[in-house]
Image: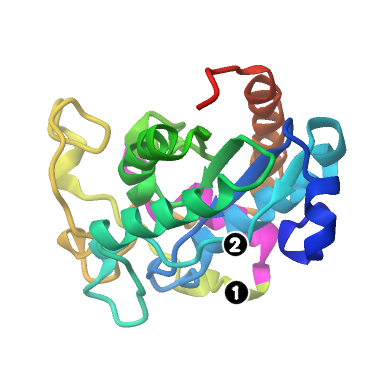
Amino acid sequence: MRDLASLRAPQVSEAVSDEAILIQPVGAIEQHGPHLPFNTDYVIAEESARSLIALHGEQLDLWLLPTIAYSKSDEHSWSEGTIWMSSTTMLAMLDDLGRCLARLPAARLVFLNAHGGNSSLLNVACRDLRRRHGLSTFLLHPFVPPDQGGELAAGEGGLGIHGGHLETSLMLHLRPDLVDMNAATANLPEQLITNRFVRFGGVAGFGWLSDDFGPDGHIGDPTSATAEHGRVAFDNAIAMLAAALAEVRRFEVRRR
């Protein structure tokens, strides 16, 4: 396994080349409704990164960094068990990370993000780390969040953004032991379904907390989720990420 944290100090300069791509999975520990575990986003980020490196690590010179568990999850802060960072804390942590990684021969850093609430901050961090530490930085999602232009499951009306069909299917594939389908219920906020502009992914964004749309905290319809759908979606995501990383490997910017 091409795992940076498993190397011994003398191995780093020999193993990690200046063409290497550092993969930083980013998850979250946050409520996902009554049917999914708090570590849903962590599992998806970690398993996506490990699968990528197992299948394409040698070809693309990928190196795995330890998955970030705690991130920007304050939309779920109402739920005990959610562990989250403020935006200032997370940006400071990511800057410290970039400062450390800039000492490695590798100059390419990819954030592999599985929590939509992180996307804006990670885009800011990509620019900051490029400017401050000279790294070539990239943001990829195994699954682009539906409220950020990603695919929507049929029947969810554009509302399957958290604990819905896709995430539940993925967890049934990756960690079925952590899923309770007996507790899965549909939660599709009726006040958003007919909106043209003020909706998830609409041109009029809005601040929201996950319990704005019901006490269970999920938003979507997980009731038809299946492990087979999760397997197909996961395999397609890995293929897409590998193709994207091939372009990352060819991408050149002026070294600083």
Up/down of 17 relative to 8, above or below: above
First in sequence: mark 2 vs mark 1: 2
Residue 99, above or below 200: below
**Which mark, residue 178?**
1
Does the magenta segment cover residue 167?
Answer: yes
Residue 18 in the image: state x and y as whole percent. 72, 33
For this view, does 47 lie left or right of residue 219?
right
From the viewer's side, name the closer residue of 93 and 46.
Answer: 93
Give the residue at x 68% y 17%: 250
Which label is found at residue 43?
Answer: 2
- Residue 246 is one of the magenta-drawn residues: no
Residue 118 in the image: state x and y as whole percent.
36, 49
Q: Name the residue nearer the viewer: 72 or 189.
A: 72
Residue 169, image x and y in percent? 59, 53
For badge 1, the amino acid type reads Leu
Q: Residue at x 37, y 33 (%)?
A: 127
Q: Report whether residue 225 is seen.
A: no
The residue positioned 17% from the left and 41% from the top of the image is 192
Drawn side of residue 239 relative to residue 117, left or right: right
Q: Position of residue 38 (x, y in %)?
A: 46, 72
In the image, which residues are magenta? 156-176
Q: Any mark on residue 107, and which?
A: none
Which mark lies nearer to you, 2 or 1?
Answer: 2
